[in-house]
Amino acid sequence: MTNQPVCGKDETRPVTLWENETVHGHALCHESCVDEHFAAVKALRDRQAAYLDSLPTDPKEAIKAARAIMTPDFEPYPEGVKEALYLSVALESLVNGEGIEGRGLDRDAARFIANRVSTAMFNVMKDLDRLSDVLENPSRFERLE
C-alpha cells in the first residue's frame, strides 16, 4: 500500500525505516544525539583541516618533507620496514619449522613476533599515508585557487 494523497490533499506521514537508514538513523533519534554526532563530525573535520593546513604547500618543501619521512636519519627505508621484514622472516621460519601448536615458548615467541610485525607495518602505513598527504598538498592548494 502506498502513501498517496487522498482526494488531492497532502497527508503528513511518518519517516520510514529505510528513509531513516539513508541518513544513518539520525531522523528518528533524539535531537541531542544528532547534535552530539554533528559536533563530533565538526571536531574531526576541524582536526583534518588543521592537519592539512600544517602540510607544506611549496613543492620543494613538500619534497623535503617527503624525503624526511622516506629516509629518516639517512636510512634507505622508512622506520619499521626492515624490522617488519626481519620479523616476518623469523615468523615464517618458526611457523614452517616445528610449528606453534599448543602452549610453550615457541607459541609465545610466534605471538610476540606477529604482534611486532603488525605494529611495524601499521607504522609504515601511517608514514606512507603521511608521505602521500605531503606530496598531494601542493596540488590541493592549486585546486583551491
Image: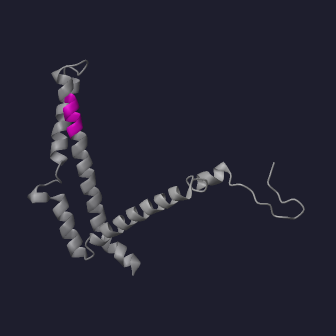
Residue placed most toward the observer, 100 or 89: 100
SS assignment for the magenta stretch, majority = helix
Query: Residue 125, image x and y in percent?
Result: 27, 51
Task: Kindly identify the residue that appears in the image at 21 percent across and 73 percent down.
Answer: 61
Task: Kindly identify the residue that appears in the image at 44 percent across and 63 percent down.
Answer: 39
Query: Residue 64, image x and y in percent?
Result: 18, 69
Determine which quarter of the picture holds residue 137: bottom left
Task: Kindly identify the residue that appears in the image at 22 percent across and 40 percent down.
Answer: 117
Query: Residue 45, image x and y in percent?
Result: 40, 65
Determine which quarter of the picture holds residue 107: top left
Look at the picture and state if 84 lies above or below 78.
above
Give the extent of the magenta segment: 110-116
Residue placed most toward the observer, 89 or 22: 22
Look at the picture and state if 97 lies above or below 129.
above
Q: Residue furthest bottom?
A: 145
Look at the picture and state if 89 lies above or below 132.
above
Q: Which quadrant of the rendered structure holds the C terminus?
A: bottom left
Count of marks placed on residues: 0
Look at the image and say whether residue 111 sits in the magenta stretch. Answer: yes
Q: Is residue 65 left or right of residue 22?
A: left
Asked if one can make out residue 16 in the rendered structure from this viewpoint, the answer is yes
Look at the image and say whether residue 90 sits in the magenta stretch. Answer: no
